Amino acid sequence: MRYGYRMLSFETLLAFWSGPIVTVNFIVFLNLFGALLLGLLVGYERSYHGRAAGMRTYGLVCMSSAALTVISGYSWAWFGGDNTIPTGVDPTRVIQGIVTGIGFLCAGVIMREGFTISGLTTAASLWASSVIGILVGVGFYAAAMMLALLCAISMIWISKLEEWLPSRQAVAINLKFEKNFQPIEAALRDMANARGYDIAGGTISIRLTEAAQEWNFVAVARSRQKMGPLSELAQGMAQFNGVDSFHLSYARN
């Protein structure tokens, strides 16, 4: 059995764990870890303001992007340092095809319903898993294991970190009013403010069907400590003058 132009042997396997290759894997890990921290920083800003894409999504995407970029700078270390790639085969084009194909797959798991977007973190983790496979494919085994570990930490523990850090929870709201009723926006904002929420600017959309107005908007909590529970906000919506029906849901990613 051959690997490239070399016979598969114990020495061939050891080449993947030689000093220079392990050093490259460690450098890749430092890049991954730094990219993860920077991605979490940007993601926290979005998460704090109640956006759908949070810390986990930004961290996974930033880290995976760094992995794809940094390994291109160490192509000499691919396949355990054996660069005898068969004629007509360009590994970088193969990687581009994989990333493009996974992008279509990730798009299929992202769902949007009104202002609520779900599946972003799942899509990011799918893309990250494809990068882990690429790292394994080019022989960066240690870096692949490190990336898998960082991804698992991001998926399991970053959500707990988001809960601990100050943030503003977003709630997607759909209100249907009685026929011919004219709602007053200021009164709606006062009701939300009394329960610790602000209606996000630029999110209000109004639809008129059979003389009845339907409002869709996002309410963002001032803080986790000051916001009322969703049931309290629902009670306020039920008591609001002219409301025929409503639907509330936390905006998640």
Image (cartoon, helix red, strand yellow):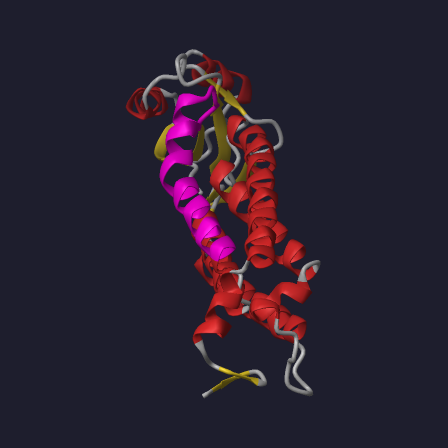
> Quick check: 143 left or right of 153?
right
Query: Is 145 inside the magenta-drawn segment?
Result: yes
Tell me the magenta residue range: 142-169
**Where residue 24 sits in the image (x, y, percent)?**
61, 53
Query: Is 175 inside the magenta-drawn segment?
Result: no
If the image is split into quadrants, where does the C terminus sit? top left
Taken as a whole, is the magenta stretch helix, strand or loop? helix
Q: Is residue 73 placed above or below 43 in the rendered structure?
A: below
Residue shown at 68%/87% (left/top)? 87
Looking at the picture, tell me which residue is in the foreground, 143 or 108.
Answer: 143
Looking at the picture, tell me which residue is in the foreground, 196 or 23.
Answer: 23
Q: Is residue 148 visible?
A: yes
Residue shown at 59%/85% (left/top)? 5
**Where residue 49 sits in the image (x, y, percent)?**
55, 27
Looking at the picture, tell me which residue is in the foreground, 179 or 215.
Answer: 215
Q: Is residue 59 placed above or below 91 in the rendered structure?
A: above
Residue shown at 42%/11% (left/top)? 194
In the current view of this chain or complex, which residue is farthest to the front?
11
The quadrant in which residue 6 appears is bottom right
If the image is split into quadrants, where does the N terminus sit? bottom left
**Where residue 173 sits in the image (x, y, percent)?**
43, 34
**Where residue 56 sits in the image (x, y, percent)?**
47, 40
- How many numbered markers are drawn? 0
Q: Is residue 119 visible?
A: no
Residue shown at 50%/44% (left/top)? 57
The quadrant in which residue 36 appears is top right
Q: Is residue 47 placed above or below 229 in the rendered structure?
A: below
Q: Is residue 1 placed above or below 43 in the rendered structure?
A: below
